Amino acid sequence: MPNVQPITKRWVLGFWTIAFCPSEGTNGSWPENSRVRLHFINRDGEKYSVSAKEGESLLEVVIKQNINIDGFGACEGTLSCSTCHLIFEKAAFQQLGEISDDELDMLDLAYGLTDTSRLGCQVCVKKWMDGLTVQVPTEVSDIRRELEVEKQKKQ
């Protein structure tokens, strides 16, 4: 059984991320063959199926696989926004483990919050997730979008 580290900071694609990710053994790495199939449904209802490495956060999967989810992960995984908000099926949600107080605080800001909502930056890929489908809410709280609308109104 992997150890759960309280907070893990990782340098990913040019920025620091904060996640509650498991690590296998003492070096924090997973075997290269530990891949699972995940399915993401974006705000437009488009389904993306990807192969993800066990131990990555769902935010990392979306970024690395270049999945078309506008505004996803605006804070780059620093747990300071809710743009990586995902909705899980109830059975899968119950297997995810406890939610930190910091994650709950950010989820309070999320649009379309459900009883099975989590932040993608805080959920790490595990073998049991093979075949899992997650839904991106249709609405998002992203200040960048609001600023763009204001900018367009002034033109």
Image (cartoon, helix red, strand yellow):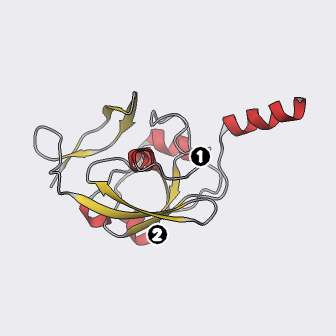
Position of 17 relative to 22 (above/below): above
Position of 36 with respect to 106 (left or right) is left
Residue drawn at (65%, 58%) of the image: 138
Q: Amino acid at mark 1?
A: Asp
**Picture quadrant of residue 26:** top left
Place of residue 70 in the rendered image (x, y in percent of width and height, measured from the top left): 60, 47
Crowd around label 2: few <14 · some 14–19 · many ≥20 (10 Å) = some
Place of residue 36 in the rendered image (x, y in percent of width and height, measured from the top left): 29, 62
Of 104 and 62, nearer the camera is: 62
Of 12 and 138, nearer the camera is: 12
On-image quarter of the N terminus:
bottom left
Residue drawn at (62%, 44%) of the image: 109
Place of residue 42 in the rendered image (x, y in percent of width and height, measured from the top left): 57, 59
Q: Amino acid at mark 2?
A: Glu
Of 129 and 53, nearer the camera is: 53
Crowd around label 1: few <14 · some 14–19 · many ≥20 (10 Å) = few
Q: Dot 2 corresponds to which residue? A: 89
Query: Do the CB atoms of the residues marked 2 and 1 lie less than 8 Å apart?
Result: no
Secondary structure at numbered mark 1: loop
Q: Earlier in the sequence, mark 2 or mark 1?
A: 2
How far apart, in angstroms, are the residues tagged by discs 2 and 1?
A: 19 Å
Instruction: Single out the residue that lies furthest toward the right.
Output: 154
Secondary structure at numbered mark 2: loop
Q: Dot 1 corresponds to which residue? A: 108
Disc marking residue 73: none
On-image quarter of the C terminus:
top right
